[in-house]
Amino acid sequence: MSMNNHSPLALCLGAAWGQLSPTLQAHYRGDSVREVGTLDVEFPTWMRPLLWALQWLGALVHRSAPQVHTVVERHTQDTQGTRQTWKRTLTYADGQVLRFDSVWVLEPDARLVEYINPWLGLQIAPHVRGTTLHYEGVCLVLRLGHWRWRLSERWLLGHTVIDEYAIDEWHFAMDFRLIHPWFGQVFRYAGRFAVDQNSQRAERYT
């Protein structure tokens, strides 16, 4: 694995990283990457108050709409590739801008956690299934200093399920869902993005 491939996902997948399509490898590689696409954001109306609260905590967005222009900026913060920042900027048709930022951290025992603020995150488990990269939520993680508490994500917010796959050499599709055991699908955003072509071209010569 070359230095600029070091990222939390690559380290978490290990040998399975090589099973990913070049498009998804370019999407998740290390270094700094900027990608542009659109997202369809949807959720039941009754979820809006909860999503307002989650937005205050730093998670998701509280406005639904189709084809929302979205920019994702990602940067790996350490040479080991264990910490990576994600900045998502959604610009709606009327000009409203919403942000959803997070930090991916590869913790001991290869646990991959996405923190939406300094003390709350979601542990996720990635798997490669054929041509699809599939994630599932494991638990919510509450951290205070050296202390860690793990809480059920399935019953509190809904089970997280994410699928991503390459469309062609330069584009991939993603589908993020929260599915509650009682209420069914309570949140979804899905769309298509163009990978950073400069970093994918650079990979061919490393």
Image: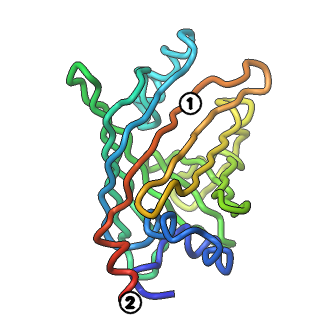
Q: Secondary structure at mark 2?
A: loop
Identify the residue at the far left of this view: 95
Residue density around tag 2, few if under 14, some if 14–19, many if 20 or more, within 10 Å: few
User: What is the three-letter code of the residue carrying label 1?
Assistant: Arg
Residue 38 left/right relative to 112:
left
Disc 1: which residue: 188
**Which residue is at a point 63% across and 58% down the rendered structure image?**
133
Which mark, by number, is residue 196?
none
Of 51 and 169, the residue lying toward us: 169
Identify the residue at the far front of this view: 168
**Which residue is at a point 73% across and 22% down the rendered structure image?**
184
Of 80 and 42, the residue lying toward us: 42
Disc 2: which residue: 206
**Which residue is at a point 33% across and 40% down the rendered structure image?**
70
In terms of image quadrants, where is residue 196? bottom left
> Looking at the picture, how far across and down is residue 171, in whole percent?
43, 55
Q: Earlier in the sequence, mark 2 or mark 1?
A: 1
Residue density around tag 1, few if under 14, some if 14–19, many if 20 or more, within 10 Å: many
> Looking at the picture, how far across and down is residue 112, in whole percent?
60, 62
Residue 107 left/right relative to 35:
right
Does residue 146 sit above or below 15 in this rendering? Answer: above
Identify the residue at the far right of this view: 181
> Looking at the picture, how far across and down is residue 105, in whole percent?
51, 63
In terms of image quadrants, where is residue 68? top left
Does residue 119 sit above or below 127 in this rendering? Answer: above
Does residue 114 sit above or below 93 in this rendering? Answer: below
User: What is the three-letter code of the residue carrying label 2?
Assistant: Thr
